Amino acid sequence: MPTAVIESLDHEGRGVTHVDGKVVFVEGALPGEKVEYSVHRSRPSYDLAQVTRIVKPGTQRVAPRCPHFSVCGGCSMQHLDSVAQAAVKQRVLEDALWHVGKVKPGVVYPAIHGPSWGYRYRARIGVRVVPSKGGVLIGFHERRSSYIADMQHCDVLPPHVSEMLPALHELIGGLSIADRIPQIEVAVSDITTVLVFRNLLPLSREDDARLAAFAAEHRVQVWLQPRQPPSAYRLHPKNAPELAYTLPEFDLRLAYLPTDFTQVNNDVNRLLIRRAMQLLDPQPGERIADLFCGLGNFSLPIARRGARVIGVEGSDALVARARENARCNGLEAQSEFHAANLFEATEDSLAALGPLDKLLIDPPREGAIAVVKALGPQQLPPRIVYVSCNPATLARDAAVLVREKGYRLAGAGIANMFPQTSHVESIALFERD
C-alpha cells in the first residue's frame, strides 16, 4: 500500500496530499498524519482514496463517537476534534474566497459555535426494506452510495429522536406498505416533534391504527406526504400545537410547517442572526431588503430593530408564512413580502424594490449571481450582509461585488451549523464607500 503525509483537508473533509505531482484525496485522513491508503478512483489529475491504516496519527484525531461513522454518509468529521473542525472550515472559506474569487476579507470573524451533538432539529431519513439485510433499514445514505446506513441511534439527532429509531424500525416493519415509504422527514421544535412519512400508497386501516398508537406512545405528531411537500398533512393526533421556533433576543416566534425550509441548528441560527444584525446594524427609518427571505428568519429581526424590511422569496408558500409571522409578531407595519424568482433578477426588478439603505442576502447553495449582477447604479446600498451555505458560490459572487460593483469584503467568518460534517455555513460583510 502507498503511504503519504496529509497536507490539509478539502471542502468535503477529505485529506489532501500530493504524490508524484498528482493530487490525492484521502477519505478518513487528517492534516499532519502519515497514512496508508488505497485508491478507488483514478483520474489523470487526481486520485480518490480511502485510508487503510494510520501510520502516525495527528494530534487532533479523536475516536468517532458513532459506531456508524465509517459507513454512514451523514457525518464526515467525527474523527476530528470539534474545535479543529471549525478551524478547518474557516480555512476552506478563506481558500475559496481567494482561489475562486481572488478576494480576501479585511477581518476574519470568530467562528460561531453551538452544541456539537444533538443539534439536528431537521433531518430527512431514508427508509428501505431489504430482506437480505434483515428487513427495514432506517438511516442516512452510506458514503458514496444510494444504500441506507441502518441506524439504531444517531448522536447528531436530538436524544429523544435518536432513542425512537428502534421503535421506528418496528413500526415500519409492521405496516402493509413498508416497502412504499422511502423517507421520514423529522422536524423538532421547542414544544413538539413531527415525523412526516412519505407514503407512495394509501394506508390500510391497520396501518392507521399503528401510526396512531405510535404517535400517542412517543408523544409525536405523525404526518403523511402522499405527493409533493405541499401535500403533507397531519394524521395523528388530530389536534396538536404548530411547529415554531423562538428568537428570544428579538422577542419573536416564527411558525412553520414540517416541510418548510428552516435551519437545522436552532442554537447556531440564533447566534448567526445576532451576528447578522450586528453587521447590518438596522436603524429606525431605514429601508432594508432581505433577499431569499424564507419565512422571515432574518427579516423579522430587522423589523424588530425598527427598520422597514422588504422580503423577497421564490416560494409563494413561504411568503405567505412570512406575512403571517409578521402579523403574529406585530410587525405588519414594518414589513412587506413579495414572491419573485431571484435567480432571474434584473436591474429593473431590483429597482422596483425602491431605494435601499442596506441589503441582506441568504441564498441556497446556488448562490445569488443574478442578484449581484443586477445591482445597478441606483441600487448599490453601502452595506450588504451575505449569508452563505456554499463557500464556492459566495466567492464567485464576492468577485462580482468587489471587482464590478465597487464593494470591499470587510469581513467574513464561519458558523458551525453542521458539526461533525464538512458543511460550511458563513457570513460576509461587503461595504461600499
Image: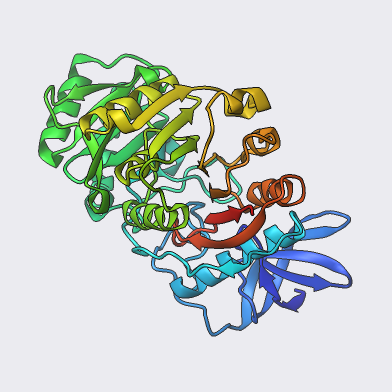
Q: How many marks?
A: 0
Measuring from the top left, give residue 37's x and y in whole percent: 70, 70
What x and y, as percent, mark residue 370?
A: 67, 33
The vertical placement of 319 against 139, above or below, is above
Quarter residue 13 falls in: bottom right
Answer with the quarter of the image where residue 327 lies.
top left
User: Which residue lies at the image location 44% right of the left edge and 61% below the top edge?
Assistant: 419
Residue in the foreground of this view, choosing between 137 and 339: 339
Q: Nearer the viewer, residue 230 or 331?
A: 331
Residue 354's x, y, as percent? 53, 28
Q: Is residue 433 in view from this perspective?
A: yes
> Horizontal placement of 271 versus 213: left or right?
right
Quarter holding the N terminus is bottom right
Which residue is most to the front?
Answer: 285
Comparing 143 with 378, the one in front is 378
- Left or right of 152: which side holds 393? right
Coloration mode: rainbow
Quarter of the figure that contains the C terminus: bottom right
Q: Specify whether 35 is left or right of 320.
A: right
| Place of residue 229 in the rendered image (x, y in percent of width and height, measured from the top left) | 40, 23
In the displayed structure, would residue 335 be above or below residue 208? Answer: below
Residue plotted at (28% across, 51% down): 162
Of 411 and 112, which appears nearest the observer? 411
Q: Is residue 139 above or below residue 222?
A: below
Asked if one can make out residue 425 in the rendered structure from this viewpoint, the answer is: no
**Identity of the residue drawn at 71% across and 76% down:** 7
Judge whether 328 appears above or below 425 on screen.
above
